[in-house]
Image (cartoon, rainbow, N blue to C red):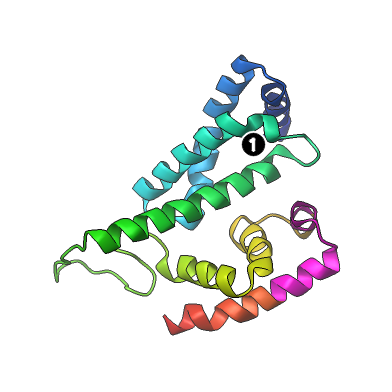
């Protein structure tokens, strides 16, 4: 998605009901969506599964994109939600069907799930943060994982910039020990 203008235009047309624009939008988005999903789910297969979910959600809910913010910002919300849902699904599947790990498989249990291939430490920390401080999750996900700038995050979350920075600081303070303790 080097040039954002055509994507933004396609998104507006697709949101208005242009099915051809939606088809082109989904085709153009796929590589970028896979890349964004890989920030959450480093295992390529997991990221691709989540990307399919994202594209399906975009196709189903494009009419909800009202154009008040950039389409890319709206898309980050869909990506974040689908990736976190995919992680929960993979975690549930792994609990239902445990796998025997061969001693020759060198994995770091703090950061990688052999089943899900996912950042267990980060995703577990996000789940815990959501349970304990739900208002801190969106700022952390949008800024530190999705790498949106502060103004975009504040707009997306619907809070003033100062409040965003305060919540982001608190979120980082909360998850830091959970990530290093894993």
Q: How many marks?
A: 1
What residue sits right under mark 1 in the picture? 2
- Residue 3 appears in which quarter of the rendering? top right
Name the magenta segment's main secondary structure: helix
Q: Secondary structure at mark 1?
A: loop
Q: Is residue 126 above or below residue 62?
A: below
Residue 145 pos. (x, y %) = 58, 60
Q: Is residue 67 above or below residue 107?
A: above
In the image, what residue occupies the spot 47% across and 65% down? Answer: 123
- Residue 157 appears in which quarter of the rendering? bottom right
In the image, what residue occupies the spot 46% across and 69% down? Answer: 124
In this view, the residue in front, 135 or 150, is: 135
Residue 96 pos. (x, y %) = 25, 60
Residue 41 pos. (x, y %) = 44, 55
Q: Is residue 154 above or below residue 17?
A: below
Badge 1 density bin: few <14, some 14–19, many ≥20, Cα 10 Å: few
In this view, the residue in front, 166 or 65, is: 65
Q: Is residue 43 above or below residue 65?
A: below
In the image, what residue occupies the spot 41% across and 67% down? Answer: 120
Query: Residue 182 lies in magenta, yes or no?
Result: no
Query: Residue 158 lies in magenta, yes or no?
Result: yes
Quarter of the image that includes the C terminus: bottom left
Residue 44 pos. (x, y %) = 37, 48
In the image, what residue occupies the spot 61% across and 36% down? Answer: 1
Q: Please provide the residue range marked out in magenta.
A: 152-169
Q: Is residue 122 left or right of residue 25?
A: left
In this view, the residue in front, 135 or 51, is: 135
- Residue 135 appears in which quarter of the rendering? bottom right
Q: Is residue 63 in view?
A: yes
Q: Is residue 116 in view?
A: no
């Amino acid at each position: 998605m080097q040039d954002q203008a055509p994507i933004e235009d396609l998104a507006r047309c697709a949101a208005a009901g242009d099915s051809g624009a939606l088809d082109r939008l989904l085709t153009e988005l796929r590589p970028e969506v896979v890349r964004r999903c890989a920030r959450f789910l480093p295992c390529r297969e997991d990221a691709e599964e989540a990307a399919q979910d994202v594209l399906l959600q975009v196709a189903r809910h494009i009419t909800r994109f009202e154009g008040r913010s950039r389409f890319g910002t709206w898309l980050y919300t869909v990506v974040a939600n689908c990736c976190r849902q995919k992680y929960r699904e993979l975690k549930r599947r792994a609990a239902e069907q445990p796998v025997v790990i061969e001693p020759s498989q060198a994995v770091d249990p703090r950061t990688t799930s052999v089943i899900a291939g996912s950042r267990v430490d980060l995703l577990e920390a996000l789940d815990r943060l959501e349970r304990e401080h739900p208002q801190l999750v969106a700022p952390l996900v949008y800024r530190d994982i999705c790498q949106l700038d502060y103004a975009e995050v504040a707009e997306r979350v619907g809070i003033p910039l100062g409040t965003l920075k305060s919540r982001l600081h608190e979120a980082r303070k909360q998850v830091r020990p959970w990530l290093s303790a894993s």
